[in-house]
Amino acid sequence: MKTHTLPISAMGFALFLCACDKEAELALRPSVATFSLQTVSYSEKDGSQDIAIELSKPAKEAGTLSVVLESDVLDGFAISPTPHDGIITLQVEQGSLGAFIKVAPIDNDKLDGTKVLSFALSNATKGLQVGAANRLESTWIDDESPSIVSFALERGSVIESSSTSTVVTLQLSHAALADGSIEIDFSGSQGSYAVDFTTIPEAVNNKIVVPVQAGSAVVSFTIDPLNDALYNAERKINFKINSVSSVLELGARSSYEFTISDDELGGRAKAYVTNAGNGWSSKRQIYYALDGSVERVAWESKTPGQTGGEYRYVYDQSGAIEKVIVNAVTYIKYIRENGRIIKAEEYDNEELDRYTLYGYDQAGNIGEVAIHDRQSDGSFAFSLDFVYLYYTDGNLYKKLVYNPAGGGEPVLITTDTYEHYVDGVNPFPIEIIHGKPIQNKLPSSYRHETEDKVLNYSFTYQFLEGGRPSSRTASGSGTMETTSYEYY
């Protein structure tokens, strides 16, 4: 077998020829154009940016690249070279390693949201070639932000007779970038529109639309109460921001409570709370009808177990008390003679369970209350007799409770004595019959006597301007209790 060995110089020449062939081949290949990045993100305020297209090698000759531009917000940008019919034509100079598209966002001080420009390399002239990385998406973030809207205050109030409009202010975190509006809803409130109050702007279907002008940092609407002659207590109107336009954003304080106080009820007794310690307490609250009469009284007692209920009052056509509804099955009916109530009948499940007879002294005060209870055989027995004595000004002096003793000599059970009255309106006086107080002033001392003991108590008061008590402290016989009063 023969072998041929080339001289070393011949081998080098062969390798040289091979390398030259590869370089020639590479020189003949086109420059490949690609985007250096596939996604980019800028802020509107960042200014002009270069979208770079890279060439895999210097361009052998001058040419052009065609880039398709896709966006529906082109009017928000200045682009160079200028696109025509959605096509950007880039000039590529001989020997260059790339080209650039200049994109300058227009900082327009408008809240117009995030914008997207998409670029796609589509065509290349001789010597150039579109590569695989031929798409780029650019995101341009709006540097403006919506104004955050909140009520300036959480609540407000006015008396219904006020002739001054209440201005309700809404604050914006910064000046609104464009015109907008705020829709405020007050559905489900206690007050009725055009009956208890009106607003500017005018409400439609319990909704107010407050306009917001570009550049405004504060907006408002007004509330005007409507005065009437009714005893309709407090009415609370809850205003809530229901929606805002796109240039605005809902803030943390989105509701506003507005209270209209009744001027007819102003100063009338509303409630009291008595605390005696060790979990013992009592509460009572008065609710008035539109004509000013007492409609119902809610009560609660803790001794220390809790009980409660509500008395409802029914009047005849002349406004005189006719019935007291104690609960779902019990009521008291009053019977009159010559304009005076002489009897009360208490029914339980429509069966007469007790009746009370009333006697009057020469001054017209109730002087005696005789209670008759139903017995198991259906008859009625005289069970308790109350005798009331008064000072000449009509305030209660003594209450004496007797056991009739089956028709024999009555037996005195207890005596309650009230003395040392002070001037001041008694907001919750003792009443024998509803609406007939027997203590118009405030006693300073109280004595409770039984057969075997005597308990003495003293009362001290704190007063509001005008003479109405704000609180009472009762002390004596090892106990102390406090009572606070509330008024409309």
Image (cartoon, rainbow, N blue to C red):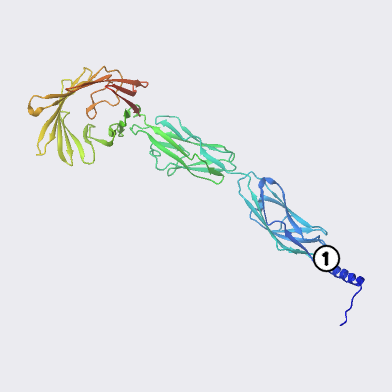
- In this orientation, does residue 85 appear? no
Picture quadrant of residue 69: bottom right
- Could you say which is closer to the camera, residue 221 or residue 255? 255
Q: Amino acid at mark 1?
A: Ala
- Residue 173 location, quadrant: top right
Nearest to the observer: residue 226 or residue 154: 154
- Residue ID at (33%, 21%): 461
Question: Does residue 92 sit above or below 479 in this rendering?
Answer: below
| Closer-to-camera residue (22/355) | 22
Q: Residue furthest front?
A: 1
Tell whether 369 sits left or right of 168.
Answer: left
Which corner quadrant holds the C terminus? top left
Outermost residue, left side:
408
Q: Quadrant of the N terminus?
A: bottom right
Residue position marked by numbered label 1 in the rendering? 27
Measuring from the top left, give residue 472's x and y in whole percent: 32, 23
Local crowd at mark 1 within 10 Å, few (<14), some, or many (≥20)? few
Position in image of residue 234 (x %, y %): 37, 33
User: Which one is nearer the viewer's eye here, 243 or 330?
Assistant: 330
Task: Write down the quadrant of residue 284 in the picture.
Answer: top left
Horizontal side of 356 relative to 276 (left or right) equals left
Element marked by disc 1: helix
Instruction: Give percent across and percent down for residue 165.
Output: 46, 32
Image spot of residue 407 (x, y percent):
7, 28
The answer to whether one can see residue 240 in this image is yes
Where 39 falls versus 9 (above or below)? above
